[in-house]
Image (spheres, rainbow, N blue to C red):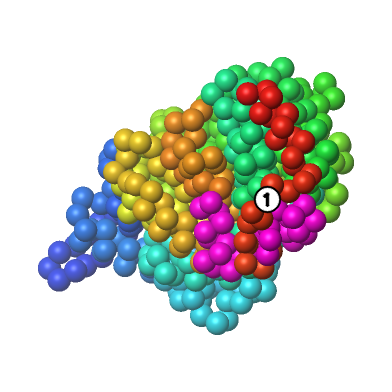
Amino acid sequence: MSANRTTPQFRHILGERTFTFADLADLMAKATPARSGDRLAGVAAETAEQRAVAQMTLADVPLSLFLEQPLIPYEDDEITRLIIDEHDKTAFAPISHLTVGGFRDWLLSDLASPERLHSIRAGVTPEMAAAVSKIMRNQDLILVAKKCHVRTAFRNTIGLPGHLSTRLQPNHPTDDLTGIAASMLDGLLYANGDAVIGINPATDNVQQATRLIKMMDEVIQHYEIPTQSCVLTHVTNTIECIEQGAPVDLVFQSIGGTQATNDSFGFNLATLAEAQDAALSLKRGTVGNNVMYFETGQGSALSANAHHGLDQQTCEVRAYAVARKFDPLLVNTVVGFIGPEYLYDGKEITRAGLEDHFCGKLLGLPMGCDVCYTNHAEADQNDMDNLLTLLGVAGCTFIMGIPGSDDIMLNYQTTSFHDALYARRALGLKPAPEFDAWLAKMEIFKNNEQFTLNSQLPSAFQPSLQRLIGGL
């Protein structure tokens, strides 16, 4: 099952010139739309002409070749073994005769209905998804992703067509509970938080995670909010929190697309299986039992020097095999968070966000996107508005909601509470149905159909605000 990385296999003659690509991995890298991470890794196309030729060559590659020639040797990588061992041949059969280009044509055709896309998803490997995305325009990525319906559930139902959920992210640089509570109240009053109320802890240990988990659980239970909470601590910390009796809803972990990447993150597939079993044993879901929350991002494998010479987008999509294994409630590509070394400007961030969302949805994942950038990237909030709107059109499962779009703990720019309100108003998208009903009950909107905010603070929250003011 080893990948052949020495003998040239792919050639394309253009006029009097012959272009040669060393192997499938090299062809994939050269066909990738331009981005700084691949230039940093030394795998990118040297010219636009070489990239175009690589894309034409890739279009003629049979999908079945990705099963025959793993990009990372089977014996060297547990993610490769996961992809190969759990590939569904029956689901693959209807598309097994196609090339990458033929697969693109089929995906864009009316034959690829939501039902058909659901039926083949287990037969599509991450490498197939990555390959076809490389020869698609942005509008192709949007159109196909919109046809991929992925539903998950815990205390509400995520991913239904015509809906856009949000993660309420009330981070605080010192984990101050009053500051976190103020952000939570602000977010809820803008109808944020139906995907999850999720905190990145400033101090990452079991004691602090338990403190934050209990605080969010108290708020959710007090106001009977049909949502779930998560502290984005290391998976081993969450396992220990569960063992100590903490009211854990979702288990979080950042994941990568190679075993070496995940080794650098301090976990493997067995760790995730243990965590999933622990969370399921609590039986805290009311309408479903999807208990995992994963985050990814192009460039993570390269930054860990664990990319095996692959392009960063292919590594990213391989991470989705890990996610798919554990039936997550949510998967989030934190698209511009690592920095301009990997995605240089707004154009590269936009392309990466659409690629990640398309590939995740095609593989059957509840894919969301942190529409974000670091302050030293060549991007601004207008670029993020564009990507947010495109993802909303594409049927993105969820986005972030952060006070003022500025995460004061993680120091990056993302989407705000009112950005989510904009997307829902502009595109006619609703929160998760159970959460939408709760918003009506709590009188957070004057008009739930038009997302008109109530001019008065809802009566149920007035005592809480008085306590917050006192605490400040």
Where does the image place residue 250, in percent across and percent down from the top left?
A: 73, 39
Instruction: Answer yes or no: is residue 61 visible.
Output: no
| Residue at image coords 61%, 36% | 183
Q: Is residue 54 above or below residue 40?
A: below
Judging depth in this view, the residue of 267 and 284 nearest the camera is: 284
Element marked by disc 1:
loop
Where does the image place residue 216, in percent across and percent down from the top left?
A: 74, 33
Q: Magenta part of the protein: which range?
A: 418-447
Where does the image place residue 50, in percent across and percent down from the top left?
A: 22, 58
- Residue, disc 1: 456
Judging depth in this view, the residue of 20 and 274 nearest the camera is: 274
From the viewer's perspective, tell me whether residue 376 is left or right of residue 92: left
Please tell me whether residue 425 belongs to the stretch shown in magenta.
yes
| Residue at image coords 26%, 58% | 51
| Residue at image coords 49%, 71% | 143
The residue at the far left in this view is 16
From the viewer's perspective, tell me whether residue 111 is left or right of residue 213: left
